[in-house]
Amino acid sequence: MEPELAVGLPAVGSVCAAFLRARPRAALLAAGVFGLLGVAAVILTSPGATSDQLGLGLSLSPESRALLIASGAAMALTVVLAPLAVERATLLTWGLAGLAGMAAIAAAGSLELVILVVLVLAVLQAAAGSSRSLATRLRGPVLAAALLSLAAVCARAEGPQYLQRFAAVALVAGLSAALGTLPYMHDFDPDERTSTSPIPWIAFIGPVLALAVLARARELIPSEGGVLGAMMIGLGLLNMVWGCVASWRTENGAAAWHYSFIADWGLVLCGLGLAIADGQSAAILLLYGIVLSRLPLYLWSRQSLREKRPNDRPINLLAAAMLAGAAPFAGFAARVLLLRGATQLYWPLALAIGLALLLWLPPSLRLGRSLGLPRGRQAWGVGIALAINVVIGLYPQPFLALAGL
Amino acid sequence: MTQILSALATHSVALVLYPGLLTIAIFGGAAEVAWTRVAKGQWVLPSTVKELRSPVVATVALFAMLAAVQVAAPFNPVPSEERNVIVAAMVLAFTVWVELALTVDLVPAPGLLLVIQFCWLLAVLGPAVQPESLRPQVLGNVLVSALLPVKVASGFLYLLCLPALLGLWPLTPPGERRARPRFDAVRALCWFPYCGLFATLFFTPSADDVPGLLRFFGITLAVAVLGIAAGAVMLRRGVEPARGLYRRAVAPYALLLLALVLVTSFLMK
Amino acid sequence: MSAAAAFIVWLGAALLVLSEGRRALALGMALITVGFAVLALAGVGALAASAILVGGGFAAGRRFRSGPDAWGVMPSGSTARVVLAAAVGLPALWISTSVMTGPGAPLRFAALSVLGLMTARVLTPSEPPAVLTALAALALSVAAAAGVAGTSPGPAVYVLAAIAAVGISLIPVRELDGA
Amino acid sequence: MPSLALLAPVALPLVAGGLTAALGLAGLKPGRAIVGAGAWVALLVLLLLWLPIRSTVELTLGPLGFGANLDLRLDGVAFAFGLVILVPSAILLTLQPRTWQEGTLAALGVAAAVLAVEGSGVLLTALAGGTAATLAVIHLDIEDIRAPRPPWGALLAAWLALSWAGGILQVVGGTAVYGAVPVSALTVPVFALLAGAALMASGLFPWRGWPAQLWSRPSLRAAGMAVATLYPLGFYLLVRAYEMGDGQYPQPVIGILLACLGVLVSLGVAVRAQAAVTRREYLGEVIPGLGGFALMAIAIGTPVGLVAGLVVLATIGVLAACLPLLPDRAGPPTLLTIAAAAGVPPGLAFGALVVALAATFEAGDFMGLIGVAGAAVWILFMVAAARAIGLPAGRGHPAIETFPRVAMALAAVLLIAGAALPVVVTTFAIPAQTDVMPRFAGLGGGLTSVSTIQTDLPALALFTPLLLLGLIAYGITGVFGTQRAARREPVAAAGEQKPAAPRSAPPRPPVFTIPGLDAPKHWLDAVRRAAVPEQYRSIVNPRALEKAAAGGRPLLWLATLVALAYAVNR
């Protein structure tokens, strides 16, 4: 199957849902059908096969395909088990738009296509309206687009070697700006709706975007892999420490979740920066964790955060363990791989990462409590998210194989 | 099976008769009577059987039996390779504290007693560090000149600690309110193990014959007499000199011994 | 010809940075569109140039029809923006001509100028019409930047950039700004 | 039995936990029967797997995906530690009442702990051990979130450190499978990491670690399970390290250091125990104290030491079941338990500790001095035990979770088992020792005595008559009858002239106090109280820092971009 369908079907689903806003059931049905077809198209797409029907050379890498499937699953999980108060059709509209964008990013044959999709997604999200000003909402993605474009220019232009290094800097900075990690954190309003907040960038679109950008980076600046990796590791460590400490100490619960995503991205950046198989595998596992568990948990914690009713039930503690990357959750396996990868590269790095890993626990306990007492669908959702995470943690092999690792 | 039964019988005999309970009772009874004569100026014997029928006495008797069979007494039915100085040392250490289980008031100056016991333990086990053996008769047999200083110093420390461990010093428990001198059955049970262990560790083993038997018991008796004499001197000089002796002399001396053990081990390595 | 086109692009970008009114914004967008179309015609071909013209033209037209009816060029307190326009233009010129070597310096200058100036426009506090116009221009510059490579990127990127520019300019500017 | 049966000791508690959870979710009350049965059957399977053949059984199930294979191995070490984990777990799960959530978590914890010892490589052990730790912490928090529990961070750090050690072994030696790690791969730094993980996992520190703190909880259901499943795992790593090092640690000095640490752990315990205010406080120190001795014995590096250490661990295993079942009131169960734990002859602990101390002397190279220190600490430990008998009971835990007769029976077993020390050594410890120290000859002595290099401990021949004599002696003194009548400490009630300790005994002073012992606590408090002086708060303002980082200010972004560009072109 061609990647165009993987882009087109969710996009059509999203448009249908938007047009049928007045009839939520019909919207839900139409969007659901198209969404499922879209995910099926992703699943049936042969990874690595290039489609040139539109003259764009679209192709899905195995990693991107795996994360697209995970994102689809996460969306299905959050939509099906969304708290009743949330309008599922709206969630599906935005989710499918995001999924279409992600599929486009994943399939894009050039960095320019990725940048254009990012711009469009940013504008679409900004168009939804929010308490933040338009310029503020667009800052991060626009900077990302500009930096990635600059990177492309620097990488392609003839000139001294340091241009390539500048390209590497721009790529890493652009990626960071798109994700909203340090030092390019997006402005976060705790009271804002999730769909219009920076969360979709860091938790939903980000994983596929990062893989796509790095895949393009390997083609653009093959000689500067070391510089690229070093910067990513450096930023990764910075994000780990800052994300954990801020998530622990910040006053607002929703902001704590935002910082926790940043901390997880620190690990991912380290893994991707290692540029060896273990690092990649660790990053993929962590991205699975972000998409399939941390994001749904965040969504389900919103109500409890608003009502300010933290809880210490078993499920909260299990969620805390999952968020902290304790065994047997996926985070632990990822950490094992990360430590091993860092050891292969430079053992003091593994020591630094190992020490930073200990920072996860206090914020995770806080976040676990912030889930409140999930009931009904929400409780099932939390349970399923935890179960998925345990399965990935105990037996990551098939999930890594799906990503071609 | 026969071997097991035979071993059980042999060890039972050792525990109950020789050098176990019976020997302990005879030797200890005599020593205790002699001590009360010296210390209190009168002959004191157990007045009632009830005095002896105490769980503390029973426990100490069990421990004393176990310690006694570890000594290198001639004709000891327990084979030489089955004796262990750690068993003797630890079991004897237990005897001191059985009364603490009853009430702390019955143990005089427990902190100081503990320090003394540590010193005594060093005297018992220190000489075993370099020979790397725990068989009592092997330790007694050590005559290597390089190890002799440790052995002699340890023996001296053992003797210094003995009066305190046997309760021959003038320190009395805070809860002690008896005016009438009594026969201390617990102490009586400890005389032979302590004195016999000294004879085992610091003298060459006696042969399994009558002269050997006489030699062993002669040394053991001499140690008991020495202990009684030392206790008597302490009693005459009072509580504070005794306390001072152990605090200011014995403990630092034990530290010196420890250093000596270290240096000796290092030199002989 | 290319150099003039590049200069026109920079001029358009500078006008976008310096203006608040719809007329000036539309003119800036139009200048950028024309400049990039000329450069695309030289580098990639007519299809790419047409796509740029259509996309950019649509964006300029939309901007001309919505927003405050004024030029609003260099309102009070624009000194910093003037400095910015020059500060981005001069390094872009230096980099594209001196640091980077090989043919296509005008295209590099144009792309770098628009990237820098439009990003600055979005990052500094701005009204939604200006932001959306800057984004449309940015989309075009992203496609134009693809032409920096020695090999032609093909017209598809330009078509997509044009679609993006059209899509961005279709967003209604009302209700966009937050509370 | 097919090798697939190796899964059973892990799978059975897992299934039991799952079943309990399912019934609980369905609104039924599954009770303690299912999880108890799961643990007992797992224990039975373990025995059936090992005892008939007494040789290693392996099961290979392929890679898991993070460098570890799901390969199980039941050898002497796995059997020994499996018993140490499963016996107390089965007893506690069967007897103590639990909610279905607690039962589920406890059963899953048992499964994880057994998997940790059955795993054939470091990484699988790390995953399973980490899981057991996570479950134990959650179990403890569910029971009582305000009560003391192991610091989660320390446990996480321990298992992460082990994972890292496994990773290094794979990178350096190509494998982290215990039996296949090249000796050269187990370098001093790797071993240090592994040992650090072991010490943290079992809380083996001279200060008051989590195994002691757990006993001050109002309820001892989760505490017992946590100690039963987590505490042996650290020792397991230290034992397996011998296998990786071909029977020895990378450097002899490491063994010496660890042995010294073991003595220090016990010393710390003994010092605290002799100053305990309540009996509960003392009982909390029992397992850590024996743990210190076990560490000392295992670290000596000789077969005798290892065997002794394993037997001490077996004692710990039984005590882990005994202590939570013990009522707080004084009485024969308490007395017997304290006696068994303090190493009173002819108990199992006594025999094991004698062998352990003998091992230090026979190891040579100044190790005898460690033995002297160990003996001194044992005396102190015993003084504390004697004192503890007369202490006030302390905070009581619910009577419904206590089983005095079972506790007394377990303590009696420990006291009687001294005579069976050779049997324990032969069936339980020597197979483990020969697995990890194949180059060394096993201990002799058969089923009647324990032979070390220089001496024989005729446990059967010596301790059996002693036991009989003890029974006769206590029978004559009337201890048994008086105890039944008075329900208080036998020594206090048996006709001594001194008045017996009253039911709520008055506080006893510590045997000694060490000045400056509270200093670290004060320092920690001072550090906790430390705050930035008012006049400097504007400089160090975390909130402002957060605002600056999260504010999305373009100038800051530009500055970081320039900094990055400068950094890579420096």
Image (cartoon, coloured by chain):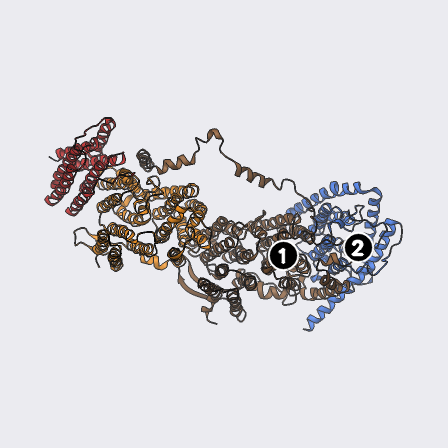
The chain holding disc 1 is D
Residue D307 visible: no
Q: From this view, report whether residue B26 is shown above or below residue A165.
A: below
Chain blue in the figure, letter: B
Residue labelled with disc 2: D497
Image quadrant where one finds the C terminus of chain C: top left
Query: Closer to the camera, C178 or D420?
Result: C178
Disc 2 secondary structure class: loop
Q: Earlier in the sequence, mark 2 or mark 1?
A: 1
Chain red in the figure, letter: C
Q: Position of residue C161 (x, y in %)?
A: 18, 44
Q: Nearer the viewer, mark 2 or mark 1?
A: 2
Chain orange in the figure, letter: A
Disc 1 secondary structure class: helix
Q: Residues within 10 Å of mark 2 (few under 14, many from 20)?
A: few
Inter-mark Cα distance, 2 to 1: 39 Å
Disc number at residue B102?
Answer: none
Judge from the rendering whether residue B181 lies leftward or rightward of residue D403; answer left or right: right
Residue labelled with disc 1: D356
Q: Count numbered badges in the picture.
A: 2
Chain D drawing hue: brown
Which residue ends up furthest to the right in the rendered image?
A: B42
Q: What amino acid does circle 2 point to?
A: Gln
Q: Position of residue C39 (x, y in %)?
A: 13, 39
Q: Position of residue D94 (x, y in %)?
A: 55, 64
Query: Closer to the camera, D243 or D472?
Result: D472
